[in-house]
Amino acid sequence: MRIVMTQRELSNVAGSEMVTVEVAKTLAARGHEIAVYSPKIGDVAKLLLPSGVQVLCELRDAPWTPDLIHGQHHLPAMAAIARFPTSSAIYYCHGTQPWVERPPVHGRIGRYVMMCEWMVLRTQAELGLAPERVTFIPNFVNTTRFSEVRRAPAQIRNALLFGGSRLPEAELVQLEAACAALGIKLDKIGHAYKSHRPRPEVFLQQYDLVFAIGKCALEAMATGCAVIPIIPGQAGALVTADTFDEWAFSNFGPRYFMSSSQINEQWLRKQIDRYSPSDLERITAKVRVECTIDVAVDRLEAIYREAAQAKPAALVADDSFAPYLEQLAKDVDPMWAELEGIHGKLKKLAEMKAKLRESTRAQQHQQVELLALYRKFHGDHLPRHLRCRELLHRMWASLRAQWSRKRLRHVIPAE
């Protein structure tokens, strides 16, 4: 089968990028002709070339009309559907947020494939799709790549916060403090923590416990690491053999409004107390049999065949809308990334303002103490200019010096 896959970008080694790479390479190894379209191509694209997978930055460069479009990410998927009006399509959904991930509603999309069962229910309700159009393929691990399995440790001595969204600073401090209190060394790896490392199949072998969700969690379990899913604002529980299927239902991600657990020492101690080496070995064996890429691609090929058999009637061969969508995908993505960056800066600025207010209150309290100390030794004959100008000037200078070190000169104006 000739298949065009779409992907928002092929620049960084991240979740959906590696799903695309691994699925495309496996399909090519099974005899399919594969081309991957991405409006933003980088180093990750090089991983596809040795397998004979073609990489396209423009859909007009496709060497053939595909039998099927494997759409991922809203705009690139719609561009491919517009470019190839007689091709069947499926949409492989990695998430419903942010908007670049949101599934497009289009009559040519025969199947919507979710990453977990929980997303099926949400997508049906949110987009009003018929149940027969929405299915799921659980996340997977490439066990050829993650070939080494570490021995389950007798006790947890070190941990890794791996991938996912960055925890708020207060929660990160709580996690570090909880680990320290239990004698657990904590490392952080991921783009969110500015400490990206490209080969988890190697570095995961160094850790007893991993805080992760989704594909990162599965890869850790396949390597022989204990896993506790956590997300901003929600602490999960240690994945055990008994709770594995429950966690798989939501792609190993805690769900809001389902628990009030928060990151703290008491919570972590409770999870560590539940750890069992033999239980971890059962989980690792289960993942390496039931959650492999071969199992996932078997199911994906079956969905391809179903979608191809329900091939839509040929439409008018007008692909004039495709270049517009291709350009829109290139133009809008940087704007989305810029907006996300602005939100992050605004959040950081709000945190700094809160610290500034706290520091101001501390300085005011210090001023009162200094006045009291002066009166203790000199009585009430404090010159007015010292009371009102000198101490205030010193307080203001102290604040400016403190925050200028944190690059806040734009917040406190120069004299």
Image (cartoon, rainbow, N blue to C red):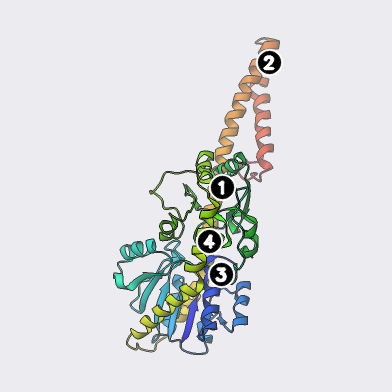
Which residue does the image show at 67% across and 16% down from the upper left? 373
Question: Which mark is on residue 348?
Answer: 1
Q: In front of the other: label 2 or label 3? A: 3
**Helix or strand or loop: what does disc 2 sit on?**
helix
Question: Which mark is on residue 143?
Answer: 3
As drawn, the residue found furthest toward the top would be: 379
- Residue 251, horizontal then vertical, whole percent: 45, 60
Q: What residue type is labelled 4?
A: Thr
Find the distance from the CA under tag 1 to the CA under tag 3: 40 Å
Figure check: 323 above or below 173: below
Of residues 290 and 106, the one nearer the viewer is 290
- Tell me which corner region of the image, top left, top right, bottom left or bottom right, holds residue 11: bottom right
Q: Which amino acid does label 2 sit on?
A: Tyr
Find the distance from the CA under tag 4 to the CA under tag 3: 11 Å
Q: Earlier in the sequence, mark 1 or mark 3?
A: 3
| Residue designated by label 2 | 374
